[in-house]
Image: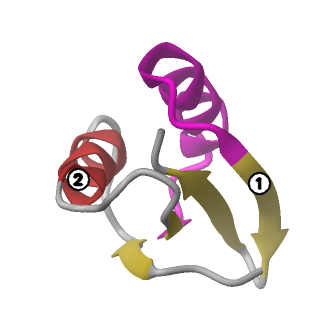
Amino acid sequence: MNHDKEFDASGLACPLPIVKTKKSLADMTPGQVLRVVATDPGSVCDMAAFAEQTGNPLLESKEEGGKYVFFIKKG
């Protein structure tokens, strides 16, 4: 999937992947897509909840090579 910016949260434990994802989205314009890579298994539920609560749609969530990859659209 095409994306405008990428953030690698590998090695970070909860809540840091969410905190840093929020920070990455802050300087993006509505409609842009952020790709987030994480290693924390808890990030799967956390990213879905974050997307729903903040109005930034989670376009895709998948596991890729032992890592979790998320595509979030800036709302």
- Per the rendered image, the range of residues in magenta is 37-58
The relative height of residue 49 versus residue 17 in the rendered view (above or below) is: above
Task: Give me the residue at 51% from left, 53% from top.
Answer: 40
The relative height of residue 40 versus residue 8 in the rendered view (above or below) is: above
Q: Quadrant of the N terminus?
A: bottom right
- Residues 27 and 50: in front is 27
* Disc 1 to disc 2, C-alpha distance: 17 Å
Specify whether residue 18 is painted magenta.
no
Task: Give me the residue at 73% from left, 75% from top.
Answer: 66
Name the outermost residue toward the top.
Answer: 53
Left or right of 24 in this view: 53? right
The relative height of residue 10 versus residue 60 in the rendered view (above or below) is: below
Which residue does the numbered mark 1 point to in the structure image?
61
The relative height of residue 29 versus residue 43 in the rendered view (above or below) is: below
What amino acid is at disc 1?
A: Ser
Q: Earlier in the sequence, mark 1 or mark 2?
A: 2
